Image: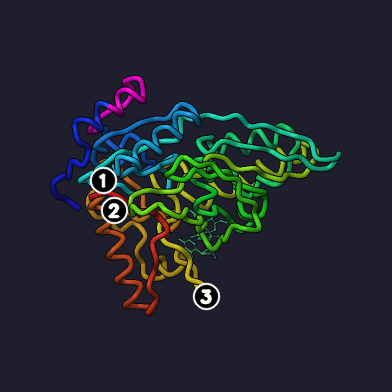
């Protein structure tokens, strides 16, 4: 997708951003540096938050100014258009964690993890500490916040299975802990409750941290099982190439998206620098020179061909943002 970038931030907001971030705000930051696909045009403003306090001040200030923002984690399930993003991109990734482990009796533990924490780091930390429950997520890239938002999961389990509660930040600056039972998870999605009085479409509720309930188990056994899961995944998915994981959701019944695309004979099909993986047909890989437009065009052609041959409308799993 091409087009002119719309500037939405006025001079006063830019001064405020410089002030509140101690000069760390960056303008026209290429989002290709912050997405696993390595594509995407510039963010009008880009801030890597350093603490929860900074996040609260930033979000509530932007909401008062009615300036739009987007929150990104690891950028691993994201396509940013080539025209880039207007407004402020808030990146939670470097807002590194605390992973705090508290014992609950002798058999369980409660682990509180900040949203910007890398999911692989959380998985290995859990294993090292003899805590079972996160092995399903091995090999999934991204951040804990992104994984909660997308209800990340595999055949081995879902993040919603081990989540106890989340801490969310509303645009008003209010923080609220929401228990698992009040959250509505569906396939690859968590619907967050909207706060009353937040009237701007561009203002999002943000996941600040997640609290997980894990079970004590022998660390050596967990490590062994983890090795097997990772080997299996490497064998089936193009893990070392630039991608955003599975590109389409699996249809609710019948064949998986990967099977359908494969049966259409599309593996290896290319548009520009974007290629349908020869290892797993539901992955698009950037061979080095892909643009977001190449990837989106390839997705369109996959959807059309699968629809023609199987009358199945594939729904994207990746999130597309930008102008
Ligand atoms: N298959 C093909 N051709 C292919 C790929 C797969 O015929 O090119 C067949 C396989 O042989 C198998 C079936 O499709 O019979 C399912 O394949 P696989 O086990 O690889 O699982 P998947 O349904 O394609 C899902 C998740 C993955 C997750 C795996 C493993 C979705 C959209 N995908 O893939 O998640 O890693 O299960 O549990 O739900 C992701 O979300 O980014 C992702 C990669």
Q: Is there CB contact under 8 Å for labels 2 and 3?
A: no
Tell me which corner region of the image, top left, top right, bottom left or bottom right, holds residue 97: top right
User: Where does residue 14 sit, x and y in percent of width and height?
Assistant: 24, 30
Q: Residue at left 26%, top 44%?
A: 85
Residue, disc 1:
290
* Alpha carbon distance from label 3 to label 1: 32 Å
The residue sitting at the front extreme is 197
Q: Residue at x 50, y 55 (%)?
A: 192
Would residue 230 appear left or right of 322 to someone viewing this image? Answer: right
Name the residue beneath numbered marker 3.
253
Sequence order check: which comes first, mark 2 or mark 3? Answer: 3
Q: Nearer the viewer, residue 72 or 12?
A: 12
Describe residue 140's horizontal placement relative to residue 14 as left or right.
right
- Looking at the image, is mark 3 or mark 1 earlier in the sequence? 3
Give the residue number, with chain letter if any, for mark 2.
295
Chain part drawn in magenta: 16-28
Q: Is 166 contained in the magenta span?
A: no
Secondary structure, mark 2, is helix
Say which residue appears at 27% left-offset and 65% top-offset.
301
Given the current orientation, which residue lies at the most extreme right position? 106
Q: Position of residue 266 (x, y in %)?
A: 34, 64
Whole-angstrom CA distance, mark 2 to mark 1, is: 7 Å
Residue 209 visible in rendering:
yes
The answer to whether the residues at label 2 and label 1 have Cβ atoms under 8 Å apart is: yes
Q: Nearer the viewer, mark 3 or mark 1?
A: 3
Residue 292 location (% of width, % of height): 26, 49
């Amino acid at each position: 997708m091409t087009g002119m970038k719309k500037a939405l931030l006025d001079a006063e907001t830019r001064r405020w951003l410089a002030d509140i971030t101690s000069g760390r705000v960056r303008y026209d930051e290429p989002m290709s540096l912050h997405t696993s696909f390595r594509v995407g045009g510039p963010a009008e403003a880009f801030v890597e938050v350093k603490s929860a306090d900074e996040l609260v001040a930033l979000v509530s200030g932007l909401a008062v100014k009615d300036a739009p923002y987007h929150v990104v984690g690891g950028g691993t399930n994201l396509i940013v258009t080539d025209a880039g993003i207007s407004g402020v991109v808030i990146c939670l990734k470097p807002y590194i964690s605390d992973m705090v482990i508290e014992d609950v009796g002798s058999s369980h533990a409660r682990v509180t993890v900040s949203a910007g924490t890398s999911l692989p780091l959380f998985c290995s930390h859990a294993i090292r500490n003899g805590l079972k429950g996160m092995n399903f997520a091995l090999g999934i890239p991204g951040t804990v916040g992104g994984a909660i938002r997308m209800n990340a999961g595999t055949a081995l389990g879902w993040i919603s299975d081990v989540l106890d509660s989340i801490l969310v930040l509303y645009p008003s600056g209010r923080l609220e802990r929401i228990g698992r039972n009040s959250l509505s998870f569906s396939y690859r999605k968590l619907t967050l409750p909207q706060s009353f009085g937040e009237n701007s479409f561009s203002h999002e509720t943000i996941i600040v941290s997640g609290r997980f309930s894990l079970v004590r188990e022998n660390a050596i056994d967990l490590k062994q099982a983890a090795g097997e899961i990772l080997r299996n995944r490497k064998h089936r998915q193009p893990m070392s190439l630039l991608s955003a994981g599975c590109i389409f959701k699996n249809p609710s019944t019948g064949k998986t998206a990967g099977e359908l695309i494969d049966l259409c004979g599309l593996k290896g099909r290319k548009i520009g620098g974007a290629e349908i993986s020869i290892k797993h047909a539901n992955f698009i890989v950037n061979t080095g020179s892909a643009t977001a437009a190449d990837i989106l065009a390839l997705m369109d052609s996959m959807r059309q061909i699968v629809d023609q041959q199987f009358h199945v409308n594939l729904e994207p799993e990746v999130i597309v943002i930008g102008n």
